[in-house]
Image: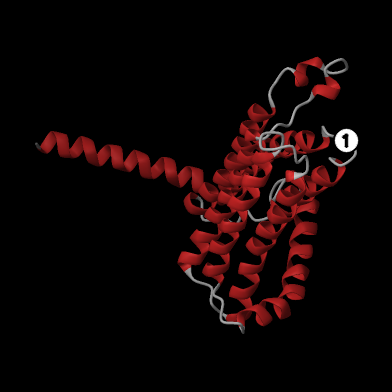
Amino acid sequence: MSWWRNFKLKTRSGYKKIMLPFGRFIGKMGISPNAISMISAVFAIASATMYAFQGRVGTFQYWWAIGFPLMFIAGMLDVVDGSVARAMGKTTKFGQVLDPVMDRFVEFCYLMGIAIGNYTFEPLESLWAPIATISVAAWCLFSFAGMIFASYSRARGESVAHMSVESVGIMERREKIAILVLGNILYIWWPVALPFGIILVGLLSFITTIQRMFYIRKLMIEIGNEDSDTQNASEEHKEENVKIEIE
């Protein structure tokens, strides 16, 4: 996994350099990174609405075709806000909290819209019954749970163990966007492509969670954090016993 992580770190570094001029251009328009994050939420809600209309509202059969570009714009805005912050030197602690929160909100809106809309595995009922019998809404819940676990494992690893978990694991935001974009494009010819993309993102997100947990555990043992945590807990326990004896 180390070579894959190094590859992703290098590509991310190059990507950040490429995006700096664009971030500087947007920043000169006077739009703050936090404002861009909030605007992405508006596009996410609009996208979810369009996906939810599919097969549910009117006879128009291409609501998803409107929802897809809106979702893509929301995803790109989540990328742009970081570029603007770096280019303009406006990186703030609140922005570092707001950005991942908005990322999860965009993902939630996208999956919620699809869960409400009429998307099924009917073409596979005679070929792959186990998947076809489970509703797309259930798979959306599965996928969102995987995203949350992957995100939370990174957040806890960085806050508790004070280590960088960046680019650890097979599924990160860029990979998620790529799979979902591909699923939407193939949906034109293969209706089950979109639900399959959602399942794949969820599955790879759970795998990423496991990879991150093993990475965090290994690194904590190497730097001795586990021993220190155990020692601190033991000392705290002793202090509590002393307090009880004194009382």
| Visible residue check, residue 99 | yes
Q: Position of residue 14 (x, y in %)?
A: 78, 70
Residue 194 sits in quarter: top right
Q: What residue occupies the far left of the structure in this picture? A: 247
| Visible residue check, residue 214 | no
Q: What residue is pinned by disc 1?
A: 190
Residue beneath the point at 74% across and 64% down:
12
Count all numbered tags in the image, as a single digit: 1
The C terminus lies in quadrant: top left
Give the colour scheme of this rendering. Answer: secondary structure
Residue beneath the point at 77% across and 48% down:
65
**From the viewer's perspective, is residue 156 above or below residue 210?**
below
**From the viewer's perspective, is residue 141 above or below residue 87?**
above
Residue beneath the point at 48% across and 43% down:
227
Left or right: residue 200 compared with residue 35: right
Depth check, front residue: 39 or 46 = 46
Q: What residue occupies the far right of the structure in this picture? A: 189
Q: What residue occupies the far bottom of the structure in this picture? A: 28
Amino acid at the residue labelled 1: Trp
Q: Position of residue 77 (x, y in %)?
A: 65, 64
**From the viewer's perspective, is residue 93 above or below residue 153?**
below
Secondary structure under tag 1 reads loop
**From the viewer's perspective, is residue 23 above or below residue 59?**
below
Q: Position of residue 56 (x, y in %)?
A: 67, 34
Q: Position of residue 11 (x, y in %)?
A: 79, 63
Depth check, front residue: 133 or 203 = 133
Depth check, front residue: 92 or 36 = 36
How crowded pointer 1 is (Cα within 10 Å; few <14, some 14-19, many 20+) is rated as few
Residue 13 sits in quarter: bottom right
Left or right: residue 55 compared with residue 233: right
Residue beneath the point at 87% across and 42% down:
186
